[in-house]
Image (cartoon, rainbow, N blue to C red):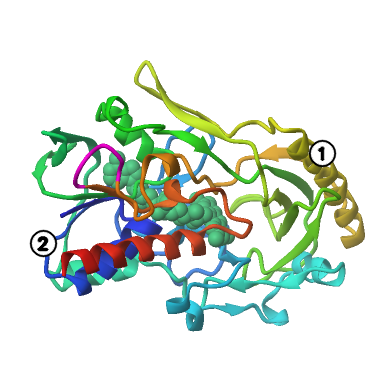
Amino acid sequence: MVVVGGGTAGSTVVAHLAHATDREIILVEPGASSPMDDEPRFFDVLAATDTWSLEGYTQPRVLGGGSAVNGLVLSGDPPLHVAELTRDADEDEMGPASLALLGAGGRRVRLWWNGGRWNPGRVASHLVEEGRIEHRRTTAERLVIRDGAAVAVVTATGEIECSSVVVCAGAILTPVLLLRSGLDRLVPHIGEGLQNHPTLALVFHALAGEGRFDAAVVHEARTTNGRAVLTIVYERASAHDSDIGLMMSSLMEVESRGRVVLDDGRIAFHFGDLSTPGDRIAHTEMSAMLDRLADACGFIAHGLPAPALVSHATSSCAMSVDGEGRLLGVGGVRIADASVLAGVPAVTPAAPVTMEALRIATAMGEEMR
Ligand SMILES: Cc1cc2nc3c(=O)[nH]c(=O)nc-3n(C[C@H](O)[C@H](O)[C@H](O)COP(=O)(O)OP(=O)(O)OC[C@H]3O[C@@H](n4cnc5c(N)ncnc54)[C@H](O)[C@@H]3O)c2cc1C
């Protein structure tokens, strides 16, 4: 079996199937293990990690994918199997911006951290060291379909024959791989339904002092039409911008949908651009909320809130699979990453992506037994 993409979902799938089955597993992932799992500050990790070039959308190219670099923020329930491995930040680990948000009605947020970053890529690395799975450091270019079923994966370094493929390349690059394989002739709606959390960012003069974590406190609110808004404050705006802080508000419940396409072979995508009246109303209110919250925290803003692209894309293949991730119209292919979520979750996405990947892997394991 070949698993394409060793990110949050791919590493979770590999970890489960390596124990649940005795099948040979080849993981196709160009990224290496992250050396940054003991580094608590998000922007330092991000700055040290290789990424794909996707028009301003940050997708890491590393074993563990988004989990190897994410902002550590876990706004929903942790998946059961990692619940004990997450915790809240203590106040003495918070920087001055987080403490200001705490004082303005924010709450301590659960972190993907317990003396180290929770990164499923580490499990995949151990399985490689144990010889249980093989990691090919290369990029999948297309799937080979014969008589209606997958028979091989063509990579940048050669072809791998297989009887089943699990695609976990992320919400942008999974539909790209399927489209590059010519599967739009066989499979409905590839790339359609893409969603993301519309986000506004405001930069402010950083307050004196440093926290152990770049983000440790969130603020939750609702718009008058009932949409959840999540605001996160970062002590600085990047690994290099320690003189400015960053406050970001995201609309967590959104109706607009976009798509991923190939335009003359080039990757093109959009997220729906606030195409419904309800989204536009909620977005306008979110902008005012962000201003008020920055005021309440005593932040001196550098300018007005501006749109920002968070890496929370989902749902671009949700209409192309059945309830257990099987690609419709083609045999031997499953998808188990963010692209199969029905919609962008109302909480930060790493936990729902992990849970969905585990659910699909469990179904696969049972079927194989
Ligand atoms: C900077 C950043 C901050 C984030 N902050 C948070 C946060 O604080 N909290 C939270 O819950 N979520 C956060 N997220 C989102 C969360 O990490 C993602 O939703 C989640 O990782 C998506 O999982 P995935 O498996 O679908 O994709 P990914 O984890 O992105 O994995 C996709 C993998 O596929 C590989 N790949 C792509 N194309 C190919 C190909 N053709 N061949 C082989 N391999 C390929 C990539 O290299 C990558 O390793 C953040 C994400 C980023 C990038």
Q: Is residue 171 above or below residue 235?
A: above
In the image, 92 versus 366, the foreground residue is 366
Q: Which mark is residue 79?
A: none
Picture coordinates of residue 132 (x, y %)?
14, 69
Does the rendering let one see residue 228? yes
| Mark with earlier residue (2, 1) | 2
Picture coordinates of residue 49 (x, y %)?
43, 52
Res. 89 image quadrant = bottom right
SS assignment at label 1: helix
Any magenta on residue 339? no
Residue pictured at 44% horizontal, 44% vertical: 318
Of discs 2 and 1, which sits in the foreground?
1
Residue bearing the label numbered 1? 281
Residue bearing the label numbered 2? 24
Where are the magenta residues, as a range? 327-332
Magenta part mainly helix, strand or loop?
Answer: loop
- Quadrant that contains the N terminus: bottom left
Residue pictured at 82% horizontal, 43% vertical: 287
106 to the left or right of 121:
right
In the image, 321 versus 282, the foreground residue is 321
Picture coordinates of residue 220 (x, y %)?
76, 62
Q: What is the three-letter code of the residue carrying label 2?
A: Glu
Picture coordinates of residue 194 (x, y %)?
52, 38
CA distance separating discs 2 and 1: 51 Å
At label 1, counting other C-alpha atoms closer than 10 Å, the crowd grade (few under 14, some 14-19, many 20 or more) is: some
